Amino acid sequence: MNQQNEQSSEACLPGELLRMARLRAGITQEQLAKKSRLTVHNIQALEDNDWNALPALVYVRGFIRIYAKEVGVDAVRAIKLLDICLAEEQEAKEMGLLDMSFQYTMPKNSDYLNAWRSQYWGTVTIAFMVAFVLMSLLSLSPATLEANEEDHKVSNTQTLDP
């Protein structure tokens, strides 16, 4: 029975499948991060099957799809392994056999999303400020000032002529 549990746990490692494919392809985690636009932290967490270090499960599935595509693994197979792994963890939890520190839990608050939103709005604010400063500088350029002076002179001479 011990061998059966070891075999099922080995078959239930989507991270191991992805890591082996990455190593066969001769790609480092940093290279994969650049190609896939996943963070090295997320790649390490996927390879370690550390679901608690990752955001919500929907993102984990997306990360697995992206990773699998980059290393030439069937994404459907990798996601099925994830589902099997999570189901086995849930079953073990219900039977009291699993240490809760290894159980995947949904994030209680959306720190990941909030961090992204604050970064996004910070970038947008800076972009608007830069645009405002550039527009202000363009309106004060010497050519613009000279054109304004000539327009002012023309309008003064027109009003003075009877």
Image: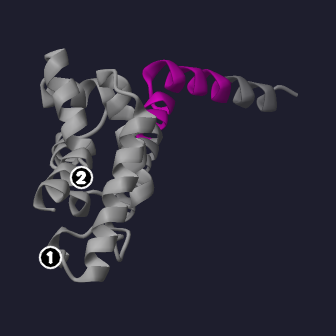
Residues rendered magenta in the picture: 133-153
> The residue under label 1 is which amino acid type?
Asp
Q: Residue at x 73, y 29 (%)?
A: 155
**Residue 114, picture quadrant:** bottom left
Q: x and y percent of residue 121 in the render?
A: 42, 55
Q: Main secondary structure of the magenta part?
A: helix
Measured in 3D between alpha carbons, the distance from the residue under mark 1 to the one under mark 2, in whole angstroms, is: 17 Å
Q: Earlier in the sequence, mark 1 or mark 2?
A: 2
Callout 1 crowding tier (Cα within 10 Å): few <14, some 14–19, many ≥20: few
From the viewer's side, name the closer residue of 143 and 75: 75
Residue 136 colored in magenta in the image: yes
Q: Nearer the viewer, residue 67 or 131?
A: 67
Q: Residue 82, percent across and down?
A: 35, 50
Q: What residue does disc 1 label? A: 99
Screen quadrant of the C terminus? top right
The quarter of the picture where residue 19 lies is top left
The colour scheme applied to this rendered structure is: one colour
The residue where tag 2 is placed is 8
Within the magenta stretch, is there residue 17?
Answer: no
